Image (cartoon, rainbow, N blue to C red):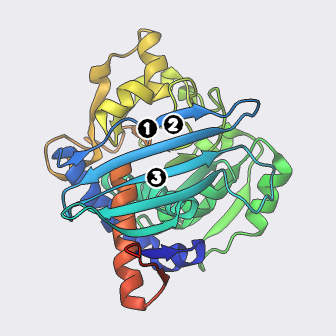
Amino acid sequence: MLILTKSDVVRLLPIPACIEVMASAMRQTSERRVVLPLRQHMPVPETKGRLILMPGYIAEPARFGLKIVSKYERPAGSVHGSHVGGVMLFDAAEGLALGLMEGGSLTAIRTAAASALATRTLARPNSTTLGMLGCGEEAHVHIPAMLAVRPITEVKVWGRNAERARSFVEHLKLPAGVTARAVVSAEDATHADIVCTTTSAPTPILKGAWIEPGTHLNLVGSAVATTAEVDHDCVARSRFYVDLREAAIAQAGELLNAIKAGVVTAEHIKGEIGEVLLGKAPGRASDADITVYKSLGIAAQDLAAAEYVVTAAHAAKAGIEVDLGQ
């Protein structure tokens, strides 16, 4: 079994490659060639932290495993991300452990790659402006992921802490021809061709009334039923897509709020991203459509990414080999 560190994962899982890995994972998910129990959350007593468990199985290649992470809000500048933990990957044929790797960076990269896949699938091809709500680890990874799939020339960043947003922009490393600036309000950031929400906000920070026709949104920060980054008007105005229908109906706070308010039903989901890729669900119908991808994150994504990392590590002779038989 290989033990792989954060630096190993970051080096061996480049975003462009991970986007294609996510495409395979999402197709398998929508073909139901997976086993994906709903993620389990355990509050840690006397803290605001949670233990999160995400088991799963994918058919190609036949792998199963578990992601185990702690999720804690941390102060700006902390050397630790909000997700700290690991991913354990097993071969399904013999039940043997293949790898144990750092899970925070793998989560950040596969999440951004999944958003990029959704953007490539749903956003207008001529999208050139990106609005980023949030300025943490996921925002850092989402910007290059969006640049990988659309011809972005301008990035607008908003954060609930204005100074942190300015610092975030100052430290961005962008290719030639791409500019970035901090904006003073979430509404300013929302006036863009593509919008990504990557915050820990428990209640909506983005109003549907702000969204212009043709916008594509990736909703990333909220992954539990009790929180939501956008209001139910945003959901109602959009063509709404998810990674896994069953998970969204159980845990997508934005959708559940809209259903509770009576503005949509569960049938408002146009399809899973994998269904669009397979031609089983319609994608964007016109340039005026507002499309939303609600990213909850699923174990199939973690396992597919982990398999790619382990394969790349063997080719690069990276990681530490541990013999579990002795």
Marks 3 and 1, how far apart at CA: 10 Å
Give the residue at x 68% y 54%: 136
First reached walking from the N terminus: tag 3 or tag 1: 1
Secondary element type, mark 1: loop
Q: Which residue is mark 2?
A: 223
Give the residue at x 30% y 33%: 245
Marks 2 and 3, how far apart at CA: 15 Å
28 vs 314, left or right, is left
Looking at numbered disc 2 in the image, what kind of residue is underneath it? Ala
216 vs 267, left or right, is right
Tell me, yes or no, whether the two marked residues, 3 and 1, touch with CB atoms within 8 Å.
no
Residue 55 position, x and y percent, is 38, 46
Checking the image for residue 236, the label placed there is: none
The one nearer the camera, 186 or 212, is 186
Residue 49 sits in quarter: top right
Looking at numbered disc 3 in the image, what kind of residue is underneath it? Lys
Give the residue at x 57% y 59%: 104
Checking the image for residue 39, the label placed there is: 1
Q: Which residue is mark 3?
A: 67
The number of callouts visible is 3
Pointer 2 local density, CA inside 10 Å: few below 14, some 14–19, many at least 20: many
First reached walking from the N terminus: tag 2 or tag 3: 3
Secondary element type, mark 2: loop
